[in-house]
Image (cartoon, grey):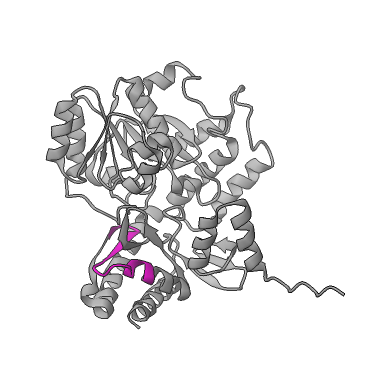
Amino acid sequence: MTAPVADVDPYTQLVDRYRKYLSKGRASLGEMFGGDVEASSSGAWIHTAAGRKILNCGGYGVFLMGARHPRVIAEVARQLETNPIATRLLLEPEVVDAAEALVSVVPAGLQKVHFACGGAEAVEAAIKLARAHGKRHLVSMESGYHGKTMGALSVTAKDTFQTPFLPLLPDVSRVPYGDAAGLEEVLARHEGEACVIVEPVQGEAGVIIPPDGYLRDVERLCREYGAFFVLDEIQTGLGRLGHWWGADREGVTPDVLLVGKGLSGGVVPVSALVASPKAFRPFDKDPFIHTSTFSGNPLAMAAAKGAIAALKEDGLVERSAVLGEQLRTEIEQISRKVLGDRVREVRGAGLLIGIEFTVPGMAGDLLLELIGAGVLANHSLNSSTVMRLTPPAVLTDDDVRFLLDAFERAAHAVLA
């Protein structure tokens, strides 16, 4: 008789399948971050296959309105039952409804919309639009993050991500973030031919907030030197910073605004480029110059409409500002009390919060301890010393208490 095969637990089977069919690295990362499996989600909470509840303060900025918001689900369910994917030859109303809804909340003067599926795809569209205007010299900021497709990667100023794929797009300059004088030097050398892409707050760099007036300086310099101004709000927009847009904090209007993450409502991926009519003109003339099969698909448009409606109806932008101030204050108090000078700074805007450490490895250690305590947070792709929190604006008072208690327990555990 042959010996019976020992039972393999479902988690090990899942890891093995990840290694076989997806990525060995991704499988190892999943094991590092808790060794559990997402099974379902609702509001601010994730439910795992092992029966745990985890407070979702991660998700890289996607879940400002939590998971499965009823307004978004209702719109998507309705569209799923009628016309989820369009032919793209006939006109279809969902895409123009979503565009109109988005234009209703962006800075005045931005009126034309191109929809895409992910943030990097929106960045690629912005680069092409700039090229169509003759703006061939790209200017991005040190530690900026704009995605990992080839064009987007060219302006994602991190050698770790760029080096394996060189050469990327030519004619790219990096400028220190927050340094208006440094930007002016580059623009003066490339007058009339530059495209500047910048974030209002650098999320992946570790929640880096520029000096007051920086975005106004960027806008002024772009106008003065004939540069194309692209504001990447894929992570910061739609209420994440406690304003509808980072642009609103300083009253600027770029040539192009990039939108993503929260536009999905946490249900269907979607991103967008929103431009002034003048900036959009090359795309306006020829409907085939920049296209994508799933651009503006009705299912994603339903999600975008639902997300914008939910933000308005539930007052989530205002809630983000109030809740963010409370969380930053209390997290800083706990950090100083428990971790002392191991913490360099707690900073943020709205519900984009970064905790920077002076001790190497502590950001990762705290991230793991937090998961053990029942809270999911984010690492920062361009900064190993910063752990980020991107909580949803739908946190209840009990959720806030749970988060702060878990943070304090995790901080103590890091020192053990």
- Residue at (48% x, 67% y) in the render: 32
Say if the magenta span includes residue 316: no
The quarter of the displayed image where residue 40 is located:
bottom right
Work out which residue is located at the far top of the displayed protein and give it: 285
The quarter of the displayed image where residue 328 is located:
bottom left
- The mark tally for this picture is 0
Q: Nearer the viewer, residue 72 or 332?
A: 332
Residue 105 relative to residue 340: left or right = right
Q: Residue 245: x and y, percent?
A: 33, 45
- Residue at (63% x, 54% y) in the render: 20
Work out which residue is located at the far front of the displayed protein and give it: 1
Quick check: 123 above or below 416? above
Q: Residue 190: x and y, percent?
A: 19, 25
Q: Quadrant of the N terminus?
A: bottom right
Residue 100 relative to residue 83: left or right = left
Q: Is residue 146 visible?
A: no
Q: Residue 4: x and y, percent?
A: 80, 74
Magenta residues, as a range?
348-365
Quick check: 233 above or below 365? above
